[in-house]
Image (tube, rainbow, N blue to C red):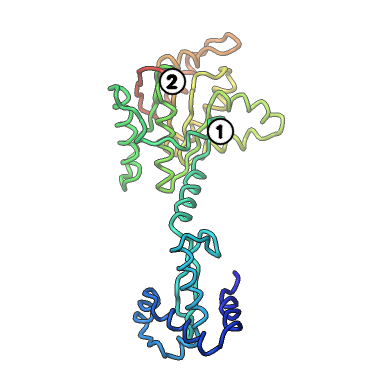
């Protein structure tokens, strides 16, 4: 940081030294913030510490003056603060509130990982969720109840939610609002568009990253599987992909949420039918037991908000 004391020295060189020093000292000692600081540290205006620190005090006063006059500060996003540094007064620059707020917001957004989902979901908020329809109000109540339970000191297991309903009624938005709410409390959420995730696993096989991608979902602090049931169902994706992920999360009782256009009963039937034409009811039922352990079924209905 540039030493603003140099600017003061330049001023001294252009005017009689004693007169200029007196003027600067008067300005400094008349500043209310300086008065408060000196009073808090039991320092008089003629104290040697004050004399030694005149350039720093002047720097502090000038920076505050620039700010009050709407001028750009020397150090963007920072404001000066006086501190005692052994036997002299120094100036420390601290981030301003706007900068801190931006940093906090950035850190919160970093706690939500979106996979094949629009980044606009990081702006989803409970306050913007329309509860004009009973099923939407009920869904919000269930989401908030889970959040309150999870953030409390209650240790009993509470399942996540399985939100199902027609296309465009706000299932994904509501779960994104939950993820953002958790982010404000320091929790991380991985939110995945599951059909797209299944498609990318073909590339994962080619580059030997299948295990890493599965592990990401298995161990996520909070996991949201969006649009489950819309994927091309194969025995491998059902048993070796989804089954493995959910088995681990069930054993560890990790918070897991789902959104789907299908009820649990409808999803079970879809999982029983594979792309090869096989019908494997037992395997589908086994997977559904994991989903039912991990989540509570909640139906959402209403108009399609994506096209209205």
Q: Around disc 2, counting alpha carbons within 10 Å, would you say few (fewer than 14), some (14 to 19), or many (20 or more)?
A: some
Q: Which quadrant of the structure image shows residue 240?
A: top right
- Name the residue: 43% across, 83% down: 26
Farthest top residue? Answer: 277
The residue that mark 1 highlights is: 115
Residue 244 lies, with reference to residue 154, above or below; the image says above
- The reply to whether callout 1 and callout 2 are in contact (CB within 8 Å) is no
Q: Nearer the viewer, residue 239 or 161?
A: 161
- Which quadrant of the figure contains the N terminus? bottom right
Q: Secondary structure at mark 2?
A: loop
* Residue 95, percent from left and from top: 48, 61
- Name the residue: 48% across, 88% down: 51
Farthest front residue? Answer: 15
* Residue 108, percent from left and from top: 47, 46
Farthest right residue? Answer: 206
Q: Nearer the viewer, residue 159 or 223?
A: 223
* Residue 19, percent from left and from top: 50, 88
Q: Around disc 1, counting alpha carbons within 10 Å, would you say few (fewer than 14), some (14 to 19), or many (20 or more)?
A: some
- Name the residue: 60% across, 82% down: 14
Q: CA distance from mark 1 to mark 2?
A: 19 Å
* Residue 217, percent from left and from top: 53, 35
Q: Secondary structure at mark 1?
A: strand
The residue that mark 2 highlights is: 168
Q: Nearer the viewer, residue 8 or 162?
A: 8
Report whether 44 appears left or right of 204.
Answer: left
- Name the residue: 43% across, 40% down: 180
- Which quadrant of the figure contains the C terminus? top left
Q: Which quadrant of the structure image shows residue 149?
A: top left
Which mark is in front, 1 or 2? Answer: 2
Q: Earlier in the sequence, mark 1 or mark 2?
A: 1
* Numbered circle sitting on residue 35: none
């Amino acid at each position: 940081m540039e030493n603003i004391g140099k600017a003061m020295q330049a001023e001294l060189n252009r005017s009689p030294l004693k007169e200029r020093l007196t003027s600067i000292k008067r300005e400094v000692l008349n500043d209310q913030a300086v008065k408060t600081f000196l009073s808090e540290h039991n320092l008089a205006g003629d104290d040697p510490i004050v004399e030694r620190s005149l350039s720093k005090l002047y720097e502090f006063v000038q920076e505050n003056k620039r700010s009050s006059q709407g001028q750009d500060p020397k150090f963007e996003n920072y404001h000066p603060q006086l501190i005692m540094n052994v036997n002299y007064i120094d100036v420390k620059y601290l981030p301003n509130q706007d900068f801190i707020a931006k940093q906090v917001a950035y850190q919160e957004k970093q706690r939500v990982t979106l996979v094949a989902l629009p980044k606009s979901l990081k702006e989803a908020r409970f306050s913007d969720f329309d509860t004009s329809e009973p099923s939407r109000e009920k869904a919000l109540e269930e989401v908030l109840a889970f959040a309150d339970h999870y953030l409390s000191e209650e240790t009993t297991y509470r399942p996540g939610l399985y939100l199902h309903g027609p296309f465009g009624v706000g299932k994904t938005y509501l779960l994104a609002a939950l993820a953002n709410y958790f982010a404000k409390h320091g929790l991380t959420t991985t939110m995945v568009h599951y059909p797209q995730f299944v498609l990318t696993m073909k590339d994962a096989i080619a580059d030997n990253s299948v295990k890493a991608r599965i592990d990401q979902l298995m161990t996520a602090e909070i996991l949201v599987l969006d649009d489950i049931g819309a994927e091309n169902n194969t025995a491998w994706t059902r048993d070796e992909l989804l089954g493995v992920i959910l088995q681990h999360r069930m054993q560890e009782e990790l918070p897991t949420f789902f959104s789907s256009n299908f009820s649990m009963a409808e999803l079970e039937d879809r999982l029983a039918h594979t792309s090869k034409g096989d019908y494997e009811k037992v395997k589908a039922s086994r997977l559904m037991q994991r989903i039912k352990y991990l989540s509570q079924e909640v139906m959402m209905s209403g108009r399609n908000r994506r096209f209205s």
